[in-house]
Amino acid sequence: MVPATIKARLIDIVGENQYRDSNEARLAYSYDATPNFQALPDAVLMPQTTEQIRAILRLCDESRIPIVPRGSGTNLCAGTCPTEGGIVLTFNRMNRILEIDEENLTATVQPGVITKTLIEAVEARNLFYPPDPSSMKISTIGGNINECSGGLRGLKYGVTKDYVLGLEIVLPNGDLVRTGGKSTKDVAGYDLTKLFVGSEGTLGVITEATLKLVPMPESKKTMLALFEDIDAAASTVSAIIANRIIPATLEFLDQPTCKVVEEYAKVGLPTDVNAVLLIEQDGVPEVVERDMQRIADICREGRAVSVKIAQSLAEAEALSTARRTALSALARMKPTTILEDATVPRSKIGDMVKAINDIAKKYDVMICTFGHAGDGNLHPTCPTDARDAGEMHRVEQAFEEIFLKAIELGGTITGEHGVGVMKRPYLALKVGEAGVAAMQAVKSAFDPNNIMNPGKMFAKDARKRVVING
Amino acid sequence: MNGKAASDIRDGFRERLDYNELMNCMRCGFCLPSCPTYGQEQYEGASPRGRIALMKGVVDGVIEPDADVERQLDLCLGCRACEPVCPSGVKYGHLLEEARDVIQSKKQHKLPVRLVRMFVFRGLFPRMKWMRRLHVAIYWYQKSGLQRLVRGARVLRALPGNLEQLERTLPDVPGPAALRSRPTALSAFGEPKMKVAFFRGCLMDTMFMETNDATMTLLRMAGCDVVVPPDQGCCGALHAHGGEKEMAKRLAKANIEAFEAAGADAIISNAGGCGALLVEYDHLLRDEPQWQERAKAFTSKVRDFTEILIELRFADRRLSLPEQRVTYQDSCHLRNVMGTSKAPRELLRSIAGIRFREMEEADHCCGSAGIYNITESKMSMGILDYKMEKVRHTEAHTIVTANPGCLLQMKLGIVREGAEARMRAVHLADFLLEAALHDSMSGGSA
């Protein structure tokens, strides 16, 4: 519970209606999209201005009340689950696009802007904001920045961090910091902008962002290549890149994934082959045409059993939409769905897919794999049932082994979902004990009282299980 | 709410809510943008994901089913726009219906509320006789000059919410003679291609009698022999959504029996709200094995009239109207439950002379939702204002709808905008008949 005196002061700051602590409100903000995590916050606050956020943080810092900033709660690492209680801070009242600067090619937005709203607003001016997480219809830019969201276009265009030029940040003590700006070149001091991207709300609250835009590609083509053999598909991915072609997207789906996606989206995905590559190229029409032909040739040389280029925009759109729904479509199979994002250098995709299949067999669990093959970011996904303790234990073991394998292949434990609570036991695997210590030192420099999203990123004790009942 | 009521509700939830379905919601949040109340409130509890979490929270014993929880469930329109966008296929509408039914049955309403509920759910809607009597009363209200007086003196200003404006949307209802003499069988114009049984509904066969007549005429033009089983009654949708499930089941059984006798190829509805419950009679009666087969036979025949018109190539006829811009507002239940969204548009596009403009978010609820615009008038008007903004962008002269509730709500929207002079709302059946007659009268020019 928030002490009555502090509650009164918080209400003074945000107004009666924007402070909620009913059981209903606390429950509604007790979860995000991560399975099996739930914890009630003490209150939910809906501020409207940076000044309000400064006052809230100052007060909570003095009183040591945890703050959990939350966009739309679609993250997959339990990053916005208030595991240590405190206050959930929402941004739906700070959802304005402040400026689209067509001369400097930047957009300045408040954190609560929905990703798709921004994408549509800039596309109306023939500009392009590439980061496109699967949840972009509802995810917020603030959430994307804090998790450094990726998406389907990561291979060619990079991820959220490549598009954040400047930030306005409120530190836990209430200080206001502006980092970066509209200039491409800026080496004035430490790059705090980059530090805050992907910081998972553990360092401060982002209240405004200046984002980089690029010209809208003139055209786009989509292709579907089918393979009998997963290894053939994986080596085709490497072959495309080795041939000096960078497709806009290069997505991989295995057979079980295709089956469920097709059942849901009904767009004509094949369900009788072992691997499917969804490939897109965008740019100047002639270049797109040439690249697509070369990619088609490479696929055929790589033993693709079928190569088909979408004939219409609608057909292409249906294919990429189908891919976007993969995760949720997998959720139809079983009550619980655990999705991971182990990532390897793209040349190791084949090894990783093979290892995942072996590990699934070893622990007798079902794992469907899809993902952004072009950037090595795979999503091994396990449809299971949280009520089956035996199976859940095997699932944990399987995923632990998958993480170890990813590291062994020179990859990482998480490509785009973040650490949150879900991966904190494994952070040291990737960055080492010294790396964790350095990160913790950064954390305490910004947030000495540990009020910002506590319990995320860093494990309190030794390695824990992947699946924790909250 | 006292402790006993709370634990009764929790037990009810535990017994009646499908736990697999609750778990099936993976909380991806993809439903949030489709939800009109989330759009208005920007608040997680007012979203489908939030409401499912609240139900699950009660079942799991994490929270008490207190007044706030009940409030969030009440605030849901039941438009079910979250279902088609749910990748996990969660049947949200079924969960909501069970939850509301449990809450209603455990609840001690105050006496006046009990009396009104009893009159509406048990007296008025299940009994066509009462429904007709009410309409005779409305008829005299309209014809005697009382309506003019009431409007002139603005007596209804004293009523709460938006009732004064709602009164202005009342169509002129048919007189007692017309209400009494309803057809039971009508032959196709020309060679019959199909025999259909028409579901007439309650409000549709009284307040919107003309629309029912238009629908039957369209069906006959398309080559249908139309029967109207005389023993049919209210579909039970108001009951099922309003927490009166047992009554809904009784009505369902009566309708199944009434239509079995008709032996038609299809059962036709022209109101999305009714049709959506008709196609779910098998689900409604799922706990009654002896009814399963009959319910399935019934639901497999239920179609919206637009689907039949398309199937019988009505759109190939010559249809025309004077030049006007037209837009279409989906009926949520027609679209999200019956899966009909293309047929009405195809029919509209086949009319020569009009310009059809698709409205942004036409698939978003208009805020009518049965009696929601009376019980939750503030939220409903917020949603309606948002809808009218989208209507304005289309610059439409005519808003076409496919359900009586939506029709009244769009009329209300026009009244609130003060746009009666330049905009009208019509049911698709009336509009299509207008187009068919206009074309034959204007000699097929267009």
Image (tube, coloured by chain):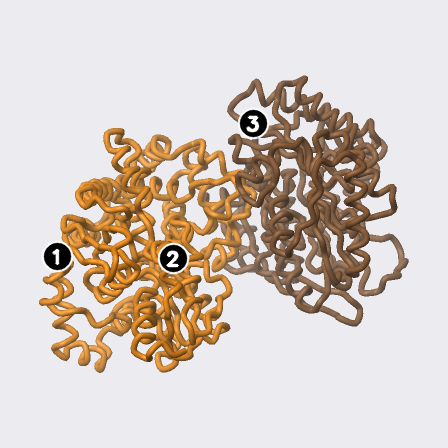
Chain colours: A brown, B orange
The circle drawn on residue B25 is none
> Both on one chain, marks 2 and 3?
no
Give the residue type at disc 3: Thr
> Both on one chain, marks 3 and 1?
no
Where does label 3 land, which residue?
A384
Residue A417 in the image: above or below residue A390: below
Task: Please name which of the two marks, 2 or 3, marks the residue nearer to the observer.
Answer: 2
Residue A55 drawn at (x, y percent): 64, 58
Residue located at (24% from left, 33% from top): B291
Q: Quadrant of the N terminus of chain B?
A: top left
Residue B65 drawn at (x, y percent): 38, 40
Residue A9 in the image: above or below residue A421: below
Residue A427, picture quadrant: top right
Please say whether residue A440 is visible from this viewpoint.
no
**3D distance between C-alphas at marks 2 and 3:** 43 Å
The circle drawn on residue B130 is 1
